[in-house]
Image (cartoon, grey):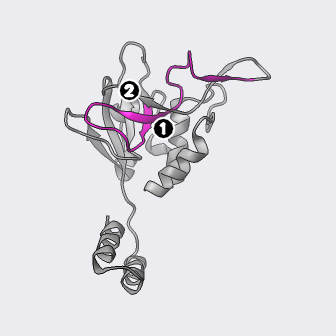
Amino acid sequence: MNDKYNSFYNQTINQSIEKEDSIALDQCMDLIFAWCDVLSIPREAVRHQYAYQVWDQANDTTKQYFDLLLNTPTFIPQMGDIAVFKQIAGIPVGHVSIDTGKSDINNLITLDQNWDTIHYYHIDPKTGARIPYTRVVNHYGYYGCIGFLRPKLLPVGDDVLLNQIQAIVNGSGTPQDKILKIREVLK
């Protein structure tokens, strides 16, 4: 997951991401659609009219590809988890973003698009419109975040897994290093 997320981050940071609706350019959902594309998860798993509905109206497809994890006072999201914000003052349609892996118990730190568009936007040279872009946001708490969608690891065929483990066993390194690598493959 780390390699996929890091590659995705490097390709999208400070970019305007548009995936589906050119009438509503570069929304938070567009960033999530792009993340789903990278993970080979169908967009239907998260597609709703409003961002808060990703949580409130999670369907069977959502649950097929994601574990829904309620935000609690002790929960810390992992890199690649999708944070879902409920309807609150200032964000009446909710919001979605992607955890950077830098969040802790006090600070939700995510990759966002269309968060605080008053200050963070590009100007479209043709129309003069403000176009949001992706950036890292420290939300300084978890206010409004109802929960997280954690992508489920898609099963790898046993033969592929066995080949990966065999390559580690036959490779160089100490037995302890090999065990750590095998544990990483089995996650």
Numbered tag placed on residue 139 in the rendering = 2
Residue shown at 48% from the left, 44% from the top: 44
Q: Is residue 79 above or below residue 3?
A: above
- Percent position of residue 117, x then y: 55, 19
- Percent position of residue 7, x then y: 55, 52
Q: Quadrant of the C terminus?
A: bottom left
Residue 40 horizontal side relative to residue 121, left or right: left
Residue extent of the magenta highlight: 96-124
- Percent position of residue 138, x then y: 40, 29
Toward the top, the furthest residue is 89
Q: Residues within 10 Å of mark 1 (few under 14, many from 20)?
A: some
Q: Is residue 17 above or below residue 142?
A: below
- Percent position of residue 91, x then y: 42, 18
Displayed quadrant of residue 98: top left
Nearer the observer, 77 or 170: 170
Q: Is residue 109 magenta?
A: yes
Q: What type is the residue that disc 2 sits on?
A: His
Numbered tag placed on residue 47 in the rendering = 1
Q: What type is the residue that disc 1 sits on?
A: Arg
